[in-house]
Structure formats: structure tokens, C-alpha cells
Image: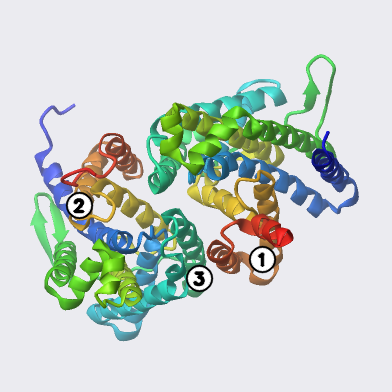
């Protein structure tokens, strides 16, 4: 048995963890934004990722351009999200958040079966738009992975800037803080809710397309993404945007390092344990400055 | 006995009698179907203790159900000759162990956090069972032969469809009576007090955490019994039954039938299985599309479930 630390492997897993973490952060920040503003725990969020991946694959086959496909998927799924919210979730406002878990669980079943009906049971592989590679120790590491992380960071940064400085971003933050007061100040709260749900859905779709060339798009990826996003959002603190991004990185790195020792299928248990430990000692989340 | 109680026992006897006669008159397919409703009904009732009576929505009942199945499988595969009662004992012990573990951690949390934690716990057991191929058979699960129906030292016969149905009916009826007694006992009243107002229950002096743990363990025990029965009926244990979709279906049974009534979830299970049967004739494997839409509509428009809705309409 070698005693020294395999530094090269650790470095590779660090890069892997960061790339996966950025994709996960894209999913989780949508989920946490939606929870923060309207108390909806979206069980169907992973299925929006999956549908985004599939519609991206269809658009890619039609246009042949990855970036157009990405844009088409984002817009399609954002519209789907708006429709889901306007048709159903709107009526659950003010009820117990548990009700929203049930409703979105029902939606998740429908969306998953719809995907099988529409796209068949086989996995889709998207071709990466960037094919170059660079040498990372003994590996040829694809530039596309790095580009994914950068793009995901750019989208999240854009969202942050929009929330911070944009006129409508301020509306969103105001509604998150105090729904009734925002309404009184003339902000159209129902429309803000629908738009936020659409933004979250669009971000989920973006991560689905970006993830496509890395792991392929399958029907079962939805449940996987939902579960991981749930873990991240709870570890980061429900409704806390910065916390869920940090937690995505934390969980992904943890899983990446764990997969050095055990098989990737078992590495998931590490993130489960991270969640349980977090809930026991900091039930409001790891990265919340002052627990309420 | 008051008139109300007499009426209740009359209805109860009638329903049990109908269920007992069912396998004698129904065609083979529906025989199996009724037996299956009983098994899923028991699972639904067990989760009602948490969802309906204590107000904690568990998304992890598949773990208890699945451990019941694997516990029964362990007894039937390792002990020669296979023994029915040993299978039941092993299944209940396995489920109780898991329930103790889950109860210890998950009851510190409330509302959505409880739901998410139970979900994560069931996924932990799913991953363990799925990847530990040498012991659990991994993706393929375990198959075994049915044990004989026996009372040690008195008699032993092979199960037929009818006797299996009666055996399952007996277990489910006993469980129902037990659960009913529990929910009407002082302990059950405390659980309902926790549902209605947790801080006040704590202020009165009840040790809320201890009651919640008891509730989770009881619920897990009965879910484990359902798992054993399902394993006996189908002669296999598979990781699919530990996956959280089963937990989701359990919650669906409760919501459809009306949580907090014990009978409601059983009716919900029957309704769900019937709906699935009818719908899948038209939609084949895509039956979850219409069933999911109906479920969402029930969540939005009938939050009390079908039974609660009927009761309200009857009272008007």
C-alpha cells in the first residue's frame, strides 16, 4: 500500500468536483430562489433539468448548433415552468409548504413519464461544442468541462447582478422579504412569482443541456438531480442563494474525494451523511450567518 | 354500547366478511388484486400514524417496507426449513431497527425538513441494498420459495391463493384494530395534540421528542409487516421497493383517501390501484401521466382527501 497522498488524483478530483459543483449550483440556486420567494419545495426540479436536456438534444439535432440548442431549451422549459406555476402552484400560495411537495411530486411523475413517451427510454448524448483538451497530470482533460463551469458561474453571476441591481430584481427581493408589503407598494406579486418560477426552470434547463455532453441525458437523471439539489439546498440553508452555491461546491468536492476511496455509486452516501450531520448540528443550514 | 359504536362494528364486520368472501367469488386476476390492496392498505395505514395523526409527512416509508421484505427474505433463505413466523419476526425486527435509526435522527426536525430527511434516509438504504450485491443480490434482488402456512406442532399446509388471502386479511385486520386502539389511547391523543399545537403540548409537559420517536417506530413496524406480507405474496425482495417512489405512492394513498382516518388511506390505496388498473388499459405504461394529474388535482382542490370530501358533503 502506498503511504503518500496521491496528489495528482486529488488535484483531478478537485477540478471534477468544482465542475460538477457549478452545474449543481445552477440547479440548486433555482430551487432555493423558488422556495425563498413562495415557499414552494419543488420536487419536480430535477425533472425540469431532464426535460431541458431532452429539448436541448432535440434542438441540437435540428439546428446543429449547441448554443442555439441551449437557448431554445432554456426558453422552452422556462415557459413550461411558467405554465406549471400559473396553472397549479399559484393556488397553493399560503398553504403548508408540505402541500407543495405533494403537488410537485405529482408533477414530477407526470413529467418523467411524458419524457419517456416523447423521447423513448434510451439515453441521449449531446456532442460538446468545444472539443479541445489540455494535459492535467496524466489525463487529457477536456476544455468543455472547464467551459461548463465558467458558463454556469456566469449565469449564476448574472442572476445575482439582476437581483441586486435590476429593477425587476429588486421587485423579486422585495417580494421575498415581505409579500404583503410588496403587494401594497404596487408590485404585481402573482406575476413576480410566475416569473421567478420560470427563471428557476430556465436555469434547471441550462444545467440539463450543459450536463448533456458530460453524462448523457436519461429519464432517471431527474430524481437524481432532485435529491442532490435538495441535499444542497438544505445544507446551504433553505432560501439562501449564496449558501446553496457554497454548499453545491462543498457537497460535490466531498463526493469527488470520496470516489477516490469507494465506488461513485457509494460516494453518494457521503453527501447523505453530510446532510444528516448538518441537520443535527445546524438545522438552519451550514452557511447561514445567524441561525434564527 | 352506544348506537354509533354498534353501527361502526356492524359496518366493520360487514367489510371484513366481504373481503373474506372475495377470493371465493372473484376471478383469479381480481383475487390477487384484492390481496394486493390489503397489503398496500396496511402500508398506507402505517404511514397514517405519522402523516394524519402526528402531522409529520414521511417520505421514507419505502425503507421500512423494503426492510420488511429483505428481513423476510433473510429468514426464508437462511433457515431450513423455511418458516412463516420466523419470516414475520425477522422482517419486523429489520424494519424496527431501521425505524429506530431513522426515528433517532429525523424526529429532531419538523415539516419539510422531516420530509426531506426521511427521503434521504430511505435513499441511503436504497444505495446500500443496491450496491451490496453479495448479500442483497443488488439490482436483481432475492427470490425464495413460499413457506408453508403452519402452526408449529399442529399442522402445516402449502399456501393457496385463498389461504394466503385469508392470512393477509387476518394480519391486516389485527393491525387495523391495534392501530385504531393506539390512536384512541392517551398516547394517540398526545400525538394528535402534537399535530395540532406542538409548542403547547411541550408546555403542558409532554416529552414531545419521545412521543414522536415512538410514533415513527410504531409506524415503521407496521410498514415492515406490510413488507413481509408483500414478500410472502410475491416471493421476492427487490431494491425497487426501497426506492422513494414507493414512499411517494404511500403519501399519495394518504392524500387521496384522507389522512388521519386510518380507513381513508386504505380506501386511497384501493382507489389508486383501481385507477392505475383502469387507466393503464388505455395508457399502457404511461398510466402515471393521468394518475399524476388526478393526484395534483386532489392535492389542490380536495386537501382533505376523497373520504374527507365525502364526509363534509354528507354533513352539509
Which circle's residue, 2 or 3, is located before the other in the chain? 3
Q: Is residue B292 left or right of residue B171?
A: left
Q: Which mark is residue A243?
A: 2
In percent of width and height, residue B202 lies at 42, 32
| Chain where mark 1 sits | B
Number of labelled discs?
Answer: 3
- From this viewpoint, is residue B304 visible? yes
Decide: marks 3, 1 in contact (CB < 8 A)?
A: no
| Chain where mark 3 sits | A
Q: Is residue B121 left or right of residue B17?
A: left
Which tag is nearer the camera, tag 1 or tag 2? 2
Instruction: Say which residue label 1 marks.
Output: B280
Q: Residues within 10 Å of mark 3 (few under 14, many from 20)?
A: some
Q: Residues within 10 Å of mark 2 (few under 14, many from 20)?
A: many
Instruction: Say which residue label 3 marks.
Output: A114
Which tag is nearer the camera, tag 2 or tag 3? 2
> Could you tell me how far apart the alpha carbons at marks 3 and 1 are, in whole angstroms?
14 Å
Amino acid at each position: 500500500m502506498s503511504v503518500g497522498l496521491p496528489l495528482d488524483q486529488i488535484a483531478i478530483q478537485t477540478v471534477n468536483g468544482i465542475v460538477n459543483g457549478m452545474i449543481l449550483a445552477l440547479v440548486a440556486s433555482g430551487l432555493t430562489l423558488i422556495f425563498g420567494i413562495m415557499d414552494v419545495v419543488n420536487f419536480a426540479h430535477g425533472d425540469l433539468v431532464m426535460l431541458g436536456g431532452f429539448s436541448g438534444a432535440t434542438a441540437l439535432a435540428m439546428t446543429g448548433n449547441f448554443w442555439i440548442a441551449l437557448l431554445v431549451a432554456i426558453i422552452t422549459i422556462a415557459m413550461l415552468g411558467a405554465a406549471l406555476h400559473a396553472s397549479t402552484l399559484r393556488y397553493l400560495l399560503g398553504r403548508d409548504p408540505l402541500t407543495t411537495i405533494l403537488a410537485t411530486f405529482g408533477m414530477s411523475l407526470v413529467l418523467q413519464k411524458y419524457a419517456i413517451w416523447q423521447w423513448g427510454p434510451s439515453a441521449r448524448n449531446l456532442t460538446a461544442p468545444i472539443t479541445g483538451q489540455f494535459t492535467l497530470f496524466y489525463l487529457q482533460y477536456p476544455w468543455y468541462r472547464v467551459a461548463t463551469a465558467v458558463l454556469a458561474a456566469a449565469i449564476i453571476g448574472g442572476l445575482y447582478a439582476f437581483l441586486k441591481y435590476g429593477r425587476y430584481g429588486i421587485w423579486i427581493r422585495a417580494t421575498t422579504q415581505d409579500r404583503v408589503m410588496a403587494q401594497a407598494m404596487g408590485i404585481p406579486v402573482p406575476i413576480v412569482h410566475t416569473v421567478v418560477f420560470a427563471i428557476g426552470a430556465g436555469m434547471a434547463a441550462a444545467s440539463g443541456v450543459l450536463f448533456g455532453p458530460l453524462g448523457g441525458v436519461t429519464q432517471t437523471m431527474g430524481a437524481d438531480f432532485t435529491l442532490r439539489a435538495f441535499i444542497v439546498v438544505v445544507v446551504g440553508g433553505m432560501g439562501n442563494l449564496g449558501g446553496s452555491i457554497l454548499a453545491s461546491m462543498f457537497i460535490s468536492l466531498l463526493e469527488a474525494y470520496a470516489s477516490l476511496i469507494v465506488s461513485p455509486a457509494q460516494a453518494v452516501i457521503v453527501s447523505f451523511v453530510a446532510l444528516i450531520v448538518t441537520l443535527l448540528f445546524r438545522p438552519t443550514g451550514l452557511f447561514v450567518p445567524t441561525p434564527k | 354500547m352506544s348506537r354509533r359504536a354498534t353501527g361502526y362494528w356492524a359496518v366493520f364486520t360487514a367489510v371484513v366478511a366481504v373481503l373474506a368472501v372475495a377470493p371465493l367469488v372473484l376471478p383469479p386476476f381480481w383475487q390477487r388484486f384484492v390481496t394486493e390492496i390489503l397489503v398496500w392498505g396496511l402500508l398506507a395505514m402505517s404511514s397514517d400514524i405519522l402523516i394524519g395523526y402526528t402531522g409529520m409527512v414521511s417520505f421514507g416509508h419505502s425503507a421500512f417496507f423494503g426492510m420488511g421484505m429483505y428481513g423476510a427474505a433473510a429468514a426464508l433463505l437462511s433457515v431450513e426449513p423455511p418458516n412463516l413466523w420466523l419470516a414475520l419476526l425477522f422482517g419486523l425486527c429489520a424494519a424496527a431497527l431501521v425505524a429506530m435509526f431513522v426515528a433517532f435522527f429525523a424526529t429532531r426536525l419538523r415539516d419539510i425538513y422531516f420530509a426531506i430527511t426521511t427521503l434521504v434516509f430511505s435513499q441511503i438504504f436504497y444505495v446500500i441494498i443496491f450496491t451490496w450485491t453479495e448479500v442483497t443480490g443488488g439490482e436483481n434482488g432475492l427470490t425464495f420459495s413460499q413457506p408453508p402456512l403452519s402452526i408449529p406442532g399442529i399442522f402445516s399446509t402449502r399456501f393457496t391463493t385463498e389461504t394466503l388471502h385469508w392470512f393477509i386479511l387476518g394480519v391486516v385486520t389485527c393491525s387495523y384494530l391495534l392501530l385504531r386502539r393506539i390512536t384512541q389511547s392517551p398516547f394517540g391523543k398526545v400525538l394528535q395534540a402534537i399535530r395540532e399545537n406542538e409548542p403547547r403540548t411541550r408546555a403542558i409537559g409532554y416529552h414531545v421528542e419521545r412521543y414522536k420517536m415512538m410514533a415513527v417506530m410504531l409506524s415503521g413496524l407496521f410498514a415492515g409487516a406490510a413488507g413481509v406480507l408483500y414478500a410472502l405474496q410475491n416471493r421476492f425482495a427487490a431494491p425497487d421497493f426501497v426506492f422513494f417512489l414507493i414512499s411517494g405512492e404511500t403519501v399519495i394513498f394518504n392524500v387521496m383517501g384522507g389522512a388521519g382516518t386510518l380507513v381513508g388511506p386504505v380506501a386511497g390505496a384501493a382507489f389508486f390501484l383501481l385507477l392505475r388498473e383502469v387507466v393503464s388499459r388505455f395508457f399502457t405504461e404511461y398510466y402515471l401521466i393521468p394518475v399524476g394529474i388526478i393526484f395534483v388535482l386532489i392535492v389542490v382542490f380536495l386537501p382533505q382527501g376523497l373520504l374527507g370530501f365525502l364526509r363534509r358533503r354528507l354533513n352539509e
